[in-house]
Image (spheres, rainbow, N blue to C red):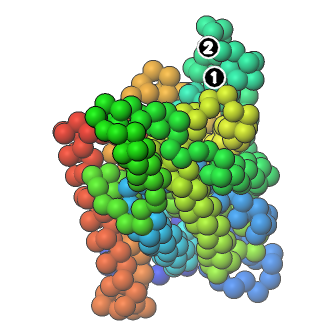
Amino acid sequence: MEAPLQTEMVELVPNGKHSEGLLPAPTPMAGHQRVEGPRRSCVEGEGFLQKSPSKEQHFTDFEGKTSFGMSVFNLSNAIMGSGILGLAYAMANTGIILFLFLLTAVALLSSYSIHLLLKSSGIVGIRAYEQLGYRAFGTPGKLAAALAITLQNIGAMSSYLYIIKSELPLVIQTFLNLEEQTSDWYMNGNYLVILVSITVILPLALMRQLGYLGYSSGFSLSCMVFFLIAVIYKKFHVPCPLPLNFANITGNVSLIEVTKEEAQLQVETEATALCTPSYFTLNSQTAYTIPIMAFAFVCHPEVLPIYTELKDPSKKKMQHISNLSIAVMYVMYFLAALFGYLTFYDGVESELLHTYSKVDPFDVLILCVRVAVLTAVTLTVPIVLFPVRRAIQQMLFKNQEFNWLRHTLIAIGLLTCINLLVIFAPNILGIFGVIGATSAPCLIFIFPAIFYFRIMPTEKEPAKSTPKILALCFAVLGLLLMTMSLSFIIIDWVSGTDRHGGSH
Ligand SMILES: NC(=O)C[C@H](N)C(=O)O
């Protein structure tokens, strides 16, 4: 078994399970640096673990500089992504009450899982998800965590770039007031994705620290707030049923031989039925709700990198940041889902923005909303890319000093792969439904729980102590959810009723 990263171990508390050979006596470090970020040696863990008597001892050559507010922006931006566009659809398949219940549960569980991650990292003095995996299960643990982070975040980034590919040409078409799409290059989604990747995403992705992205994250969030306001506004301005649906109803009724009054009554009853909210629904699509919500709340790969860069870090402060971000996103998610649902009811599609196109594809407000969502997801890509680069560095170049060339090449390599995926294999994005159903439960439920169980020393918390039993139940819950989502997706595929598509 390889030696753990000495650089990140300062106070090693054996967990009493597998420490032999894995946890050599801590030695003060020289030479080895963390793979990511500026030069930092053992001091990071020191400051992190102990209440240091002086600030100098807290962090010497690397001191987190990101403020509380900027960290909230970054974490909220990591949470918020394409997931929000699928929530109205989820509500249409659960009803308002069941949706609220599930959303609350996923938000609370998400926060609890961050608590487990922070507690585990506090024990070992490591603020890297992969290194927690390593400490808990050696190399397989580290690889499993790095793989889940890579798959989850590449899936998320592909879904963001896919939104750019499909929505940006429409935005340009509307701006140019063109009735139909032309064959010009600026109407071609593929070229536009490459252009946005090079001009906006790459420069931001090259930032050495996440903290620098605080401003772009703040801007991205304000775009999403605008999206939310527009969704609420539209609820009161889009007729229900939509003229198209209304024509269908009247068409159906006129086929049947009835008197004029009866026909009128029937049309009205059907229209009312189409436009009445449901509070509790169960159907074949309900099974997708948890994976959609789990995907929407994933931010776990970003939590520890954000913690690393936090000014005057403490577990409590980071938990506050996480709780605040989750709470704000919870409210935004609920409102977006509720008003999106109350606008189209059962007619809402798995991607909310598409549904608005049915009303009027050239509506100015919807055009602005598109631009806002495009901006928001574009600015989220660099945040989500950060942990993937870190995972790759941890897997392939561990113990090596920061190197600009490597840093840049990994970012370019990742962006190129995602661009190629989105351009040449958009259908493959359906595969990310499966990945989302596997990696999201792993990152939120299973890994934090089992890592915690292994890392927390038995002298501190025996295996039968309440926190450990809770953690185990949490892992079992994650396993159940994973099995459930996977089996429903497979059943859907086999029976050919996959309405969900996309990657959220
Ligand atoms: N960061 C992620 O993995 C996904 C994000 N929570 C989203 O909703 O798009």
Residue 333 falls in image quadrant: bottom right
Instruction: Kindly indicate whether the residue at mark 1 contacts the one at mark 2 (C-beta within 8 angstroms).
Output: yes
The residue carrying mark 2 has its beta carbon less than 8 Å from ligand 1? no
Q: In the rendered view, would you say 395 is above or below 11?
A: above
- Asked whether 101 or 165 is in front, the reply is 101
Furthest residue toward top = 183
Q: Which residue is mark 1?
A: 169
Measured as percent of width and height from the top left, residue 158 is found at 51, 36
Q: In the rendered view, would you say 352 is above or below 189?
A: below
Residue 172 falls in image quadrant: top right
Helix, strand or loop at label 1? It is helix
Q: Is residue 453 visible?
A: no
Image position of 459 (left or right of 210): left
- Identify the amino acid type marked 1: Pro
Mark seen at residue 181: 2
The residue carrying pointer 2 sits among few (fewer than 14), some (14 to 19) or many (20 or more) residues within 10 Å by Cα, namely few
Measured as percent of width and height from the top left, residue 352 is found at 53, 44
Q: In the rendered view, would you say 104 is above or below 364?
A: below
Mark seen at residue 60: none
Measured as percent of width and height from the top left, residue 499 is found at 34, 40
Image position of 27 (left or right of 407): left
The Cα–Cα distance between marks 2 and 1, rounded to whole angstroms, is 8 Å
At 72% from the left edge and 83% from the top edge, which residue is drawn? 52
Helix, strand or loop at label 2? It is loop
Which of the image's four quarters has the N terminus? bottom left
- Numbered marks: total: 2
- Asked whether 80 or 52 is in front, the reply is 80
At 70% from the left edge and 65% from the top edge, which residue is drawn? 72
